[in-house]
Amino acid sequence: MIFLTVTAHPDDEILGFGASAAKFVSNGHEVYNCILSGDVNARLHRPDLKKLYEDTCNAQKIIGAEEPILGSFPNIKFNTVPHLELVQFIEKVIEEVQPDYIFTHHPSDLNDDHLCVSRACQAASRLSQRKPVKPIKGLYYMEILSSTDWAMPSNVLPFQPDTFVEVGEVNFDKKLKALEAYDGVMRPFPHPRSNEVLKGLAALRGGQSGKNYAEAFQTAFQILNL
Ligand SMILES: [Zn+2]
């Protein structure tokens, strides 16, 4: 199977899907991470672009993903980009990668770039109903600590996990190492992007599903072809 994540920022792909990616790759599947922002100008405490590019590539290697697919949309300003441009960029990636499953941001995240990406990815995921590309089997929303968990009450329901991937300690450790490959992502506890909270969430999602550490997702769209 071919898995594609579509996220706004370098590190989102690891926070949401890193341990699942490591597991799927070790089971013989392919994982492509499309990160729409390679521009770090608006990010405080961040290395320059070249260093961030190296960090991003290293993180992919640690989890076994393919070379990252990077866009240059303006960080923390995705809402200044026409929706259509985001959709067309993601559609091009879908045509190239031909994914079976797509994972993207939840549409109630606190981070506005995440919302823009989620909406664009929902639209792009319908590509096979407009063009002759391989239909996807499923679209899922990810849980990104310090964004999904920081969402305020709104008219969009918060993250409600319904799909769980058992990752075990080995793949969870790869996720942590991949996050540590990025400068400035991991923070001291009680920040959500700390070892303690990441491991606590993996244990909680494992407990909810009867599994040994898990990452959780919410189904947006799924085709059952049994
Ligand atoms: Zn992000």
Image (cartoon, rainbow, N blue to C red):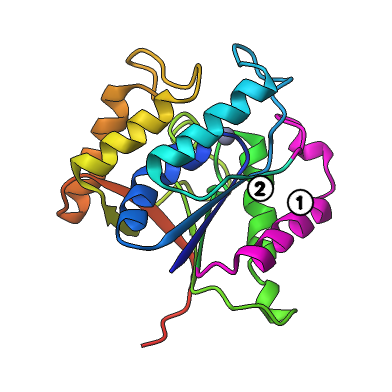
| Residue under label 1 | 86
Looking at the picture, which amino acid does disc 2 mark?
Val
Who's the residue at 70% across and 57% down the image?
A: 90
Q: Which residues are the magenta region? A: 72-100
Q: Assign the N terminus to one quadrant of the image.
A: bottom left
Q: Position of residue 172 (x, y in %)?
A: 27, 39
| Residue under label 2 | 117
Residue 9 occupies quadrant: top right
Q: Is residue 98 magenta?
A: yes
Q: Assign the C terminus to one quadrant of the image.
A: bottom left
Who's the residue at 45% across and 60% down the image?
A: 30
Using the image, determine if residue 39 lies above or below residue 73: above
Q: Relative to the observer, which residue lies in front, 128 or 68?
A: 68
| CB-based contact (under 8 Å), mark 2 and mark 1 | yes
Classify the position of ligand 1 by quadrant: top left, top right, bottom left or bottom right.
Answer: top right
- With 225 as the anchor, is 215 left or right in this view? left
Decide if residue 224 is in sight here.
Answer: yes
